[in-house]
Amino acid sequence: KQEVTQIPAALSVPEGENLVLNCSFTDSAIYNLQWFRQDPGKGLTSLLLIQSSQREQTSGRLNASLDKSSGRSTLYIAASQPGDSATYLCAVMGAITALIFGKGTTLSVSS
Amino acid sequence: EAQVTQNPRYLITVTGKKLTVTCSQNMNHEYMSWYRQDPGLGLRQIYYSMNVEVTDKGDVPEGYKVSRKEKRNFPLILESPSPNQTSLYFCASSPRLAGQETQYFGPGTRLLVL
């Protein structure tokens, strides 16, 4: 059964730092991997989707990589800002049509 | 504006009183699903639908029902709610077979069952 793990569970950084969030999954047979952002009391916003055939995707200050063979993905956030404070969720889509989510990394960026 | 809407956003009810949480999307998506989010357990899928009249169970379907009579709507029904169904519920939709496309999530419905 697919399991998704995110490390660290929480992270606090000062504004301006570059940071990396980690995601690992146990079954490499995935269709895609998505990174989401969740603000307190709000829904999920899709940040990046990486197809299984791709190695990385970029959007603005965000860059996500995927190494399917090793079961790992990273989300790189450049020049972090207080507005980046949120919970970041990694999710993989496997053979069954459901996203399997990690428990998230809660990021706090201080000004 | 392309969006997934859910109603109600907040609901307090009592054990055994049937309720329905509505979900609607205006993007003509084939695929829709329901998730629940609980502290320490993360998000888990309840039911999904590949298209009109096609629904199937996710990881935690017990105590829930769904229907997909129209493409845009996918209501979640709790026939006899129990306190262990207190949770934050999300509806999501995707353009076609989920696995190739981004999933779009609604704002969530926070349910408290007393």
Image (cartoon, rainbow, N blue to C red):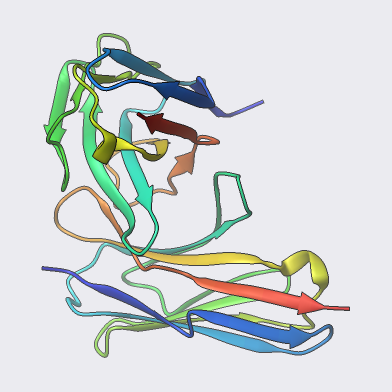
Seen as rendered, the residue at the extreme top is B69
Q: Residue at x 19, y 16 (%)?
A: B79
Horizontal side of residue A98 vs B106, given as left or right: left
Residue B105, horizontal then vertical, whole percent = 48, 40
Q: Residue at x 73, y 87 (%)?
A: A13
Give whichever of B108, A80 is nearer the camera: B108
Q: Residue at x 32, y 14 (%)?
A: B19
Total marks drawn? 0
**Quadrant that contains the C terminus of chain B:** top left
Residue B33, horizontal then vertical, whole percent = 31, 35
Camera sees residue B27: no
Residue A57, horizontal then vertical, whole percent = 54, 72
**Vertical comparison of A64 with B67: above or below:** below
Give whichever of B62, B51 is nearer the camera: B62
**Quadrant that contains the N terminus of chain B:** top right
Q: Quadrant of the rendered structure where residue B95 is?
A: top left
Seen as rendered, the residue at the extreme right is A111
Q: Quadrant of the rendered structure where residue A55 is?
A: bottom left
Residue A27, horizontal then vertical, whole percent = 17, 76
Q: Quadrant of the rendered structure where residue B88 is?
A: top left
Horizontal side of residue A43 vs B102, given as left or right: right
Horizontal side of residue A1 vs B6, given as left or right: left
Camera sees residue A48: yes
Horizontal side of residue A77 vs B92, given as left or right: right
Q: Residue at x 35, y 38 (%)?
A: B86
